[in-house]
Image (cartoon, helix red, strand yellow):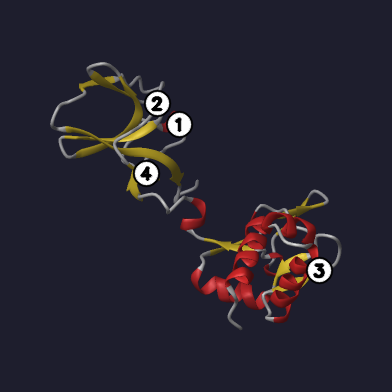
Amino acid sequence: MEPLTEKQRQVLEFITSRLRENHPPSQREIARHFKLAQNAAYQLVSYLKKKGYLVNSGGHRGLRLSQAYLDEMAEVEGMPVLGRVAAGEPILAEENVECYVTFEDLFDRSKETFLLKVSGDSMIDEGILDGDYVVVESGSCVDNGQIGVVLLDDEATVKRVFVQKHRIALKPANRKAGYKTRYIKQFDKDVRIVGKVIGCIRTDVR
């Protein structure tokens, strides 16, 4: 596909992000977002259509990504988003692909993030199951009550973290099993807060 100028790329990214939210932007909204005259926004959108990135399905908010661009995105940008709903019925078909989503789109990669595989059932009441992957934002600061990852003697554990005056409380979430809150010394050299959990990925849905 034809290369884009920096401004064209920015406009395309804005339109793509709005489509991911299922809110196609109008040209007036594009102009307002970029502080442009409306005719300048119209020209930018026209260039994106001529270069094959956008198509218009009609109407005030009819901008859509072209199939050629969607195919190009599919090679590098992950899985298709299909699940739009019209008149109460789900539409799941290739022609309804609005965008492609990667792991980076779902979680902020501007911050240091990594995955850990969960072993055990101590957090199932929080929806974190044995075998899930938690997405962790690296850092030693976790707000009280947040779910975090703490390293204890080289073994990582996922719990709700409460930092108290001289100790850290690690609270599990499995009332049925009756797991107890664990208390550890805050400044123990074998204890380190690794980061906070910002997401959970389930690969085995039953």
Secondary-structure class at tag 2: loop
Disc 3 element: loop
Q: Which residue is the site of mark 3?
A: 57
Q: Is residue 1 visible?
A: no
Q: Amino acid at mark 3?
A: Ser
User: Do the CB atoms of the residues marked 4 and 1 lie less than 8 Å apart?
Assistant: no
Q: Nearer the viewer, residue 105 or 28?
A: 28
Q: CA distance from mark 4 to mark 3?
A: 40 Å
The mark found on residue 126 in the picture is: 1
Residue 66 percent across, percent down from the top left: 69, 74
Q: Which residue is mark 4?
A: 136
Asked whether the beta carbons under mark 2 and mark 1 sit within 8 Å of each other, the answer is: yes
Q: Is residue 28 left or right of residue 97?
A: right
The answer to which of marks 1 and 3 sits earlier in the sequence is 3
The answer for how far apart the CA atoms under marks 2 and 3 are is 48 Å
Q: Quadrant of residue 197?
A: top left
Q: Residues within 10 Å of mark 4 (few under 14, many from 20)?
A: many
Q: In percent of the image, x 71 and y 65: which residue is there?
A: 96
Q: Mark 1 to mark 3: distance in Å?
A: 42 Å
Mark 2 = which residue?
173
Between 96 and 101, the residue placed more toward the observer is 101
Residue located at (43% from left, 41% from top):
198
| Circle 1: residue type | Glu
